[in-house]
Image (tube, helix red, strand yellow):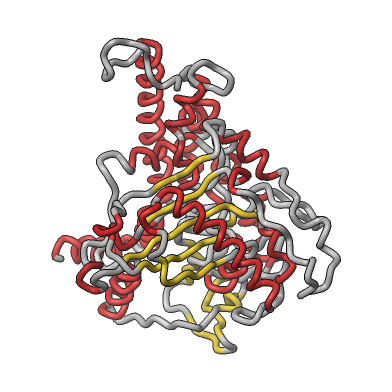
Amino acid sequence: SNCAAPTNSPHSIHPTHLTALYQYHIQELFGVLVSVVAMGLKVLPPFLTRIIWVFFDPIWRRFGTPSVATVLDRCGMGKGGPLAKLGGALVYLYGDYGTNPARAPWWLHSLVSTHYYGGAFFPTGGSSSIAKTMVAAITRNGGHVFVRTPVSEIVLENGRAVGVKAKGVTVGAKVAVISDAGFRNTFGTSDAPGKQLVDPVVGEAQRALLQGSNENGGAPDKVGAALCMVYLFVGLDKSDEELGIKARNVWALKDFDHDAAFHSFNELDLVSSTADLELDDPDGAPTIPKMEDLPAVFLGSASAKDGDWPRRNPGKSAMTVLVPVKAEWFDRWDGTKIKNRGDEYKAYKSAWKELMLEALYKHWPETKGHVVYTDVATPLSNNFYLNSTRGEVYGLEHTVERYDGVDAMVALHPQTAVPGLYMTGQDVLCVGIVSALTSGFLTTARVSYKAIFYAALEMIGS
């Protein structure tokens, strides 16, 4: 490996490597700093953001929006160089934001990478405790939370958002409408025309800031959907301690050259020979890729990360395996109903299950023979449960174009161009629980500084 220096001491680092690492961490520091400023500007009204951006833009373009691959080149760890493997090792977690180094912005990688310095966090009681805590806070302050009540439309009066329509019932807004449905669902997307919550005529100005004008129709979005994944949820009949499962995330990567790995993946064609065959035709389902065709595989254990798990589920453990896929591999079953997509779909999911179990056994061989439960979720599952349009797991794709310039930043500002309508959620900032929670603070600040003041007092008091 290029990461190890041929010296007598196993702990010494070759001067060339040390210089590259020093440059990398300097760039990383600047990436974090400019990201804090850029995201902090979203607490201001959009017109002030535009004014300040004039002075901030050169700094942002230097340290924020160069691609990850560009910055690795600056540090002497670029593709084809003697330290390319070192660079590949440092950006191994690109799967956390779902975009390969040639297309991902540097500030985002810096933020995600430094987030893990010293370890990470996991909610006691599992991820569901986040929703429970939020619901409790909403109801404690006089609000209500409804489930299985999808919003079909944001109601407008004279161009102003005044409420929402859900299951045919119009619910009026006292102060403002806040959409956490994502930019694509709120303002529309070229790959799912007509699905937007806001009237397209009223919302076009906001949409065009990010995607460009589409007066003639048919133009693809500049910023598309994030990648799709297939999930395998695994239940085991022994504890994490018995199986040696650690509280950590594993990214198993095809190659140090992540761009080449993703290019090969994107070239895969698994459907052209079967696209015209009828559903449930014995030869109709697409094939699945080989393990070596996948650019990355993620493995993690919620039970190992949750200190309260042994009390709730003694002698048991749970793991999750994720692999990237293409939405078109599942288009064959688009339009079918959840839990009733046919035997062909079940067989296809079963093939994915076996492939992903292969990855699990490779990295945790102790789990073999102890799997007692499996469930596979596909991009179609995401479309149903997350209301995504192409099975995307991270909302908008995290590319350089998404953050390139003041128009893009204002497009994803909490305060939209539609009076009375605000956005929140990870599309406002970036992927991640912390990002989504931070966006809630920014959105609340745009709706009411008074609300932020009381929220801060409540947080201090708790």
Residue occupying image coordinates x 54% and y 42%: 403
Q: Can you tell which quarter of the image residue 303 is in?
A: bottom left
Please give left or right for residue 228 compared with residue 244 in the image: right
The one nearer the camera, 154 or 86, is 86
Relative height, residue 109 to residue 214 (above, below): above
Residue that extends furthest to the left in the rendered view of this protein: 461
Residue occupying image coordinates x 25% and y 69%: 315
Please give left or right for residue 158 compared with residue 310 in the image: right
Residue 208, horizontal then vertical, whole percent: 66, 52
Q: Is residue 185 visible?
A: no
Residue that extends furthest to the front in the rendered view of this protein: 369
The one nearer the camera, 289 or 66, is 289
Residue that extends furthest to the right in the rendered view of this protein: 276
Residue 201, horizontal then vertical, whole percent: 70, 65
The one nearer the camera, 338 or 316, is 316
Relative height, residue 111 to residue 210 (above, below): above
Residue occupying image coordinates x 14% and y 65%: 461
Q: Is residue 9 visible?
A: yes
